[in-house]
């Protein structure tokens, strides 16, 4: 076989850590994972939202779905990865819609992300989401937070907490 030296040489995106858009490479910080998650919510990238959710996060959204009328068997199929493409797609569209609703009223492209200081556990982190306000109004205004865990491979979002549900 003759190789054309000018031919495109594809990069192994998984090995380089670049990965497909939305997939967090190993070692990426919690702030970047949170930013990728919120961007996926903003752009409706359902699969990336699901991929960046941790085990506890997936369990939580499936429990919420069951509480809102989803069949328990459908939740089991989603949990196990055996749901049909249509079933999975419908669920993920609803999930992203719900997450957008949680962040409603905020310019998702203008959010700022800040890692809270030291977590008591090195495998857990919390990232505060805020918007910049004029200095006269106090500067940054927190609008939510994301709780993340590291699963040994990458940081994953476990909870997205809109400001309206946080205690003062």
Image (cartoon, rainbow, N blue to C red):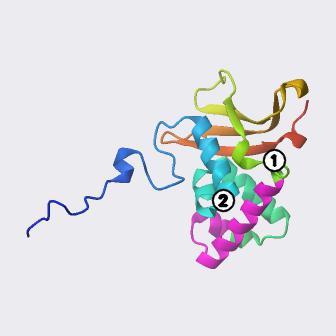
Answer with left or right where residue 63 lies relative to residue 1: right
Q: Name the residue at 66% across, 24% down.
A: 119
Residue 75: quadrant of the picture = bottom right
Label 2 neighbour load within 10 Å: few <14, some 14-19, many 20+: few
- Residue hosting label 2: 43
Q: Main secondary structure of the magenta part?
A: helix
Where is 150 relative to 64, above or below? Answer: above
Q: Name the residue at 37% across, 52% down.
A: 13
Q: Which residues are magenta?
A: 75-101
Residue 37: percent from left, percent from top: 64, 49
Answer with left or right where residue 16 lies relative to residue 53: left
Q: Secondary structure at mark 1?
A: loop
Residue 47: percent from left, percent from top: 59, 62
Where is 54 relative to 147, above or below? Answer: below
Answer with left or right where residue 140 lies relative to residue 50: right
Q: Nearer the viewer, residue 65 or 2?
A: 2
Where is 57 relative to 87, above or below? Answer: above
Q: CA distance from mark 2 to mark 1?
A: 14 Å
Q: Quick one: quadrant of the C terminus?
A: top right
Is 47 within the magenta? no
Q: Name the residue at 67% across, 66% down.
A: 76
Q: Name the residue at 65% across, 72% down.
A: 89
Is 86 within the magenta? yes
Residue 106: mark: 1
Q: Nearer the viewer, residue 112 or 38?
A: 112
Q: Is residue 22 visible?
A: yes
Residue 81: percent from left, percent from top: 57, 66
Q: Quick one: quadrant of the N terminus?
A: bottom left
């Amino acid at each position: 076989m003759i190789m054309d030296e000018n031919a495109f040489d594809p990069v192994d995106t998984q090995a380089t850590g670049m990965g497909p858009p939305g997939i967090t490479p190993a070692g990426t910080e919690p702030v970047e994972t949170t930013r990728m998650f919120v961007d996926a919510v903003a752009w409706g990238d359902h699969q990336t939202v699901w991929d960046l959710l941790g085990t506890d996060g997936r369990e939580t959204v499936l429990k919420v779905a069951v509480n809102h009328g989803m069949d328990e068997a459908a939740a089991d199929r989603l949990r196990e990865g055996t749901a049909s493409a249509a079933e999975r797609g419908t669920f993920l569209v609803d999930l992203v819609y719900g997450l957008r609703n949680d962040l409603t009223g905020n310019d998702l492209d203008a959010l700022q992300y800040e890692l809270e200081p030291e977590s008591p556990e090195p495998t857990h982190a919390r990232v505060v989401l805020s918007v910049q306000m004029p200095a006269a109004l106090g500067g940054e205004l927190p609008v939510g937070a994301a709780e993340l865990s590291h699963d040994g491979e990458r940081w994953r979002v476990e909870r997205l907490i809109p400001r309206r549900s946080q205690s003062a």
